[in-house]
Amino acid sequence: MSKKDNNEMTFLEHLEELRWHIIRSLIVVILIGILAFVFKKFVFDVIILGPSQSDFFTNYWLCRIGTNSFLNTLKLCINSNPIKLQNIQMAGQFTAHIKISLIAGIILAFPYLFFELWNFIKPALYTKERKMAQGSIVAISFLFFLGVAFGYYIICPLSINFLYNYQVSDLAVNDIKLMSYISLIASVCLGSGVLFELPVIVMFLSKIGLLTPAFLKKYRKHAILIILVLSAIITPPDVFSQILVALPLLLLYEISIKISAGITKKQEMIS
């Protein structure tokens, strides 16, 4: 079956089509960004600065777990001291406000952004390929938001606690800039969202033959080592916090191996 009208479109027509997909995506991002800009107090005081507060969900429950009768340790009581941020530029806080509003727009508009991307590439796919991709918007969006939540509730508070309290010398005092703090939150949340797309990426690469379960199994030890090292760096010096960060990432890697194995087996049966 030939591809749907794809070969009948000229290069300029493809560019025009892409331009409108991009314009619609930008409009949605900007509209959500404006909404986030309006609710400044909630966005900054509750969401952005939340992971640095002692009453934040993760910080509170880690402290509760650490101070129970079994563990009886204060090591899990992270971010107990309020973080102090500074702004040294005249337009620094306004710039930070705009930046975080746009980032919020990108994160919240992610399902729509992928929907526009899907509508652009869909006409170039065969019917069989479209059927295989059914439900991809829901799956990809779910994994992205799951990754953002993991980064926000797990990695962010642990990273803030580690980096804010880390000192090379008692003579060096951490005086954190507002933009530096925002960049940390944004990069962790977006990075985690992309990282949780690993099963989808593995599925795609396996379908086109660029990745095999044998390759993933071969480098499993390397992946485990990297995950454990990263977990040890950003968490307090206790096994519980390291497991809290490492376990979901290890599980994600194992799921990716299963997905790749299933696709490879199916392709072998067809051939």
Image (spheres, helix red, strand yellow):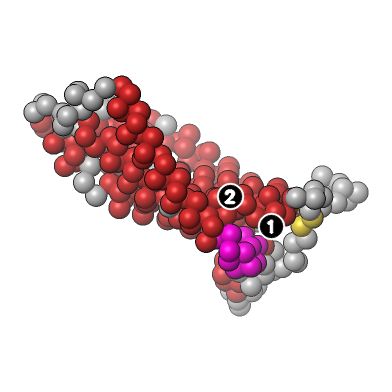
**Dot 1 or dot 2, earlier in sequence:** 1
For the image shown, how many numbered marks are present on the structure?
Answer: 2
Q: Dot 2, crowdedness within 10 Å: few (<14), some or many (≥20)?
A: many
* Outermost residue, right side: 171
How far apart are the two marked residues, 1 and 2, measured between alpha carbons? 16 Å
In the rendered image, the quadrant that contains the N terminus is top left
In the displayed structure, 239 sits above or below 46; it is: above
Camera sees residue 95 = yes
Camera sees residue 63 = no
Tell whether position 49 is magenta.
yes
Q: Dot 1, crowdedness within 10 Å: few (<14), some or many (≥20)?
A: many
Type of residue at label 2?
A: Ala
Type of residue at label 1?
A: Asn
- Which range of residues does the magenta coloring cover? 36-50
Dots 1, 2 in contact, CB < 8 A = no
In the rendered image, the quadrant that contains the C terminus is top left
Kindly identify the residue that appears in the image at 18 percent across and 35 percent down: 129
Kindly identify the residue that appears in the image at 28 percent across and 35 percent down: 121
* Outermost residue, bottom side: 69
In the image, which is nearer the foreground, mark 1 or mark 2?
2
- The residue pinned by badge 2 equals 186
Q: Observer-nearest residue: 192 or 222?
A: 192
Kindly identify the residue that appears in the image at 37 percent across and 50 percent down: 112
Q: Observer-nearest residue: 154 or 82?
A: 82
Residue 206's disc is none
Residue 49, image x, y percentages: 65, 62
Kindly identify the residue that appears in the image at 50 percent across and 51 percent down: 30
- The residue pinned by badge 1 equals 161
Tell whether position 123 is magenta.
no
Residue 145, image x, y percentages: 43, 55
